[in-house]
Structures are given as structure tokens and as C-alpha cells.
Amino acid sequence: MAQSTASSTGPDVDRPSGLAGDAVRRIMHVAAALRHHQDVEIAALGLTPAVARALHELDPDHPLPARDLAEQLRCDRSNVTALVDKLEQAGLVQRKVDPADRRQKTLVVTDAGRRMRQRVHEVMSDSRLLAGLTTDELSTLRDLVWKVSDGGCPEACGTD
Amino acid sequence: MAQSTASSTGPDVDRPSGLAGDAVRRIMHVAAALRHHQDVEIAALGLTPAVARALHELDPDHPLPARDLAEQLRCDRSNVTALVDKLEQAGLVQRKVDPADRRQKTLVVTDAGRRMRQRVHEVMSDSRLLAGLTTDELSTLRDLVWKVSDGGCPEACGTD
DNA sequence: TATTGTTATACTCTATAACTATA
DNA sequence: TATAGTTATAGAGTATAACAATA
């Protein structure tokens, strides 16, 4: 499948055929396994994945308005309402009207929320699935994925 | 599991603190970006992500019963019904009763399905997001994620 | 008029349980 | 009785559109 058969999916640089595609599919495979593990552990904390990720995005030391949380989660404002409802019902977050702009509601993480958020962070960082790598390999892997996520997509990102 | 702090989340080998957790969170970040890209391109093909992934799992040269597809997708049999409904309506797959066991329905990929599956495969292998890596880096990355997914979790997998 | 948060609504994805037709 | 596929149903997640309060 040469360079650029049909759509815009073909490799635009000269590379051993299949290399990049293999890498992508393997990354997705590993990520799915990691995600599954995380979801199981999150359920054990009594949270749903979306609620846990919302809590994880909140910085206890720098309360945000709901609008900013939506932006960080890359989802619509309307979803945040339900997520924060659950966090508030669980006593992990409190809504406080911003006196400076009474339209905004600031999301304040409670003490219980702080503790839960720490546990969520540990789940999100759980690396048991990477136990087969040596420390050097792990370090290399971290640097490579970091490089990718840090701007590996110079011009193609305009696609979105 | 553990000689460490609280739950079962701590590292069970001696490692620079945060290394593995950083790697995990970065992998998830990259995977989310890849997934988003794929979902956009899949939508452009007129498919939903789940339907596209179902088609992708099917081997045109070796038709499967629906039960096996459910197993490959790691989801319940009941979901496969709706997915195959859509594939059949789109003319990409045909259900054929297995004469040897009339309970089973074999999923046969049509010619149109074959072509669509190829396009889905290209989307799933789209590596534009990895364009910032050199060929050597890409090769290293592929080998490392391969090693992880190939059994990087010897004893801990019993957890599931 | 524009923006924040909310509500109403709908669609996708996935799971469980009950049903049918085969075996 | 056990299994393959289906149906009914429910919940989670996310999106769009319309609304109230506020700016």
C-alpha cells in the first residue's frame, strides 16, 4: 500500500511499510488494557470513570468554574452538570457561586474529595501492566510517548 | 501485593518514583488523541466507532459465527446483534445460517465490506500523530509497546 | 446581546436477563 | 439440559438545543 493510496491516511514520509501502523495499533491495544484496569479500580472506589476523571482534573488548590472543567475534559458544559451533581452528592466537591460573577459556579474540592482524588491519581498512574519492562525501557518509553504528545503532529493537527 | 503504601497501586519493584506513572499517563494521553483522530475519520466513512471495529475484527477470508466476534470484541453477545444489524443494513456483511449447526449464524463480509474494512484498517493504522518520531524512535516505541502487550504482566493479571 | 449553568432530549455503547430455536 | 442469537431494558457517556439568571 504505497504512499498515499486513497484518503489522507498514507504515510507522508519514507518509512518501512507497516512500522508506524503497527506501533499505533499496539499503543491502542496497551491503552485499552490500561483503561480496563483503571476502570475496574475506579469502580472499586465507588465512582464511575467519567466522574473519577472529572475529580482528577480538579486542582484542590485552584478551584475552577464548571466551564473550565468542561474545557479540560474536552466535553460539553451540559455534561459537567451531571458529573458535578454526583461529585457533590458524594461530598467530594462543593459548588460555590462566584461573588465577582454570579453566573459562575466555582468547584471546590472538599477534604474528602482531596483524599479521593489522590486515590484516583494512584489508579491513573498504576503501572502494573508495565512491570515487564526494565527501568531503562520504561524510561525510554516514557520519553518517546512524551515526545509524541508534546507536538508530534506539526501540520496534520489542522485536520481537527 | 504489596509491600507499599495503601491500596495495591504502589510500585512493587524498586524504581525511580513517578517514572512508571508518568509513562502510563502519557500513554493514555497519546491513545486518547489517536482515538479521537480515528473516530473522526471513521465518522467520515459513515460508520460509528463500534461498528467499524466490529468490521475490522472480521476476517473476510475466514467467516466467523457471531459468538466469536463477541469474544474478539470482548463484549456481550447481545451487543453483536445490533452491530451486525447495522453492518448488514449497510451491505457490508451478510448473516448466513450454518448448515452444520443451525443455531449459529456465520458473518460473511461482502465485497463492499471488504473494501470498507480496508479503509477502516487504514484509519486504525493512521500514524500522522507519530510523525514527530524518527524511524528509529518509532521502531523502538513499537518494540516496547509490543513487549508490554505481549505479557508484561506475569502475575498481576490474576487480578482481573 | 453574550455567557454560565441547567434542563430536556437523543444517540451510542455496553451489560444483564429472559426468550427462541436449535442441539 | 445447554448453547447461539435475539429482544427488552437499563445505565453510562456525550452531544445539541432551548432556557433562566446574570453580565
Image (tube, coloured by chain):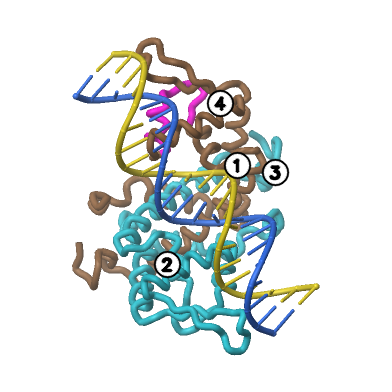
Chain colours: A cyan, B brown, C yellow, D blue
Q: Nearer the viewer, mark 3 or mark 2?
A: 2
Q: Badge 4 sits on which subunit?
A: B
Provide residue A109's location: percent of width, then percent of height.
43, 79
The quadrant of the image that shows the N terminus of chain A is top right
Quick check: do tags 2 and 4 share a chain?
no
**Amino acid type shown at disc 3:** Ser
Q: Which mark is residue A97?
A: none
Badge 3 vs badge 1, beta-carbon distance below 8 Å: no
Q: Residue at x 46, y 58 (%)?
A: B27
Q: Which residue is mark 4?
A: B88
What separation in Å lies between label 4 and label 1 (alpha carbons)? 21 Å
Badge 3 vs badge 4, beta-carbon distance below 8 Å: no
Residue C21, relative to residue A66: is it above or below?
A: above
Residue A9, relative to residue B109: is it above or below?
A: below
What separation in Å lies between label 1 and label 2 (alpha carbons)? 36 Å
Q: Which residue is mark 2?
A: A86
What separation in Å lies between label 3 and label 4 (alpha carbons)? 27 Å
Query: SS of the residue at dot 3?
Result: loop
Q: Residue at x 59, y 72 (%)?
A: A67
Q: Badge 1 sits on which subunit?
A: B
Q: Badge 2 sits on which subunit?
A: A
Horizontally, residue B43 falls left or right of residue A40, namely right
Nearer the N terminus, badge 4 or badge 1? 4
Badge 2 vs badge 4, beta-carbon distance below 8 Å: no
Is B90 or B26 nearer to us in this picture? B90
**How many residues crowd around disc 1 within 10 Å: few (fewer than 14), some, or many (20 or more)?**
many
Q: Nearer the viewer, mark 2 or mark 4?
A: 2
Q: Which residue is mark 1?
A: B123
**Amino acid type shown at disc 4:** Glu
Tell me which segment is drawn in magenta. Answer: B58-73
Q: Which residue is mark 3?
A: A8
Residue A136, relative to residue A28: is it above or below?
A: below
